[in-house]
Image (cartoon, rainbow, N blue to C red):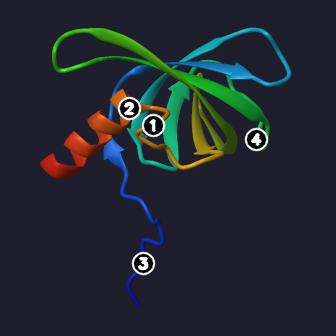
Amino acid sequence: MACLDRRRFRRVPFLCTVLVQPSYSDFLVEAKTINISQVGVLLTCCTPLPEAHPIMLRFLFNLPSGETVLEGPVAGSIARLRLDDDVAFLGVNFDCTLKRSTTPNLMDVIARLLTQG
């Protein structure tokens, strides 16, 4: 029997810098995105963060115009942690589905990537 993809929202490859702030600390962890959907993101970074902990994310990326934007905060939590040598892969679920009203530039990028693939 074929394996079904049960995701409601399609992931798209998306590379940008993300500033991650764990709820239990004032420090920021710099991470990179691998892919994103309206309900979550896969990040890679050098600092493993514990599963199930709430975090705040701020996305730093370039618009097609060349302008650099910092968008967020977006609330979420670490759903999965995988360590591979010195690299942590973090599966993050957003607390709320991304919406154009709160993250307009990020939603535009996701919509553009969805139409390309």
The type of residue carrying mark 4 is: Glu
Closer to the chain start, of discs 3 and 4, is 3
* Disc on the earlier residue, 2 or 3: 3
The residue lying at 36 percent from left, 38 percent from top is 107
Rounded to the nearest angstrom, the CA distance separating label 4 from label 2 is: 28 Å
Q: Nearer the viewer, residue 74 or 3?
A: 74
Question: Which residue is labeled 2 in the image?
Answer: 104
Residue at image mark 1: 101
Residue 82, which numbered label? Answer: none
User: Which is more foreground, mark 4 or mark 2?
Assistant: 2
Q: Are marks 1 and 2 in contact (CB under 8 Å)?
A: yes
78 sits left or right of 4 in the view: right
The CA span between labels 1 and 4 is 29 Å
- State which tag comes first along the sequence, 4 or 2: 4
- Reading the image, the residue beneath label 3 is 4
Residue closest to the far bottom: 1
Q: Nearer the viewer, residue 84 or 70?
A: 70
| Residue at the disc numbered 4 | 51
Confirm or deny contact between disc 3 and disc 4 (CB under 8 A): no
User: Which marked residue is nearer to the observer: mark 1 or mark 3?
Assistant: 1
User: What SS does tag 4 mark?
Assistant: loop
- What x and y, as percent, mark residue 54? 76, 35
Res 116 visible = yes
Instruction: Tell me the distance, in whole angstroms, between the alpha carbons under discs 3 and 4.
Output: 25 Å
Please tell me which residue is depicted at 19% across the width and 10% down the height of the picture: 66
**Residue farthest toward the right in the current orientation of the protein:** 24
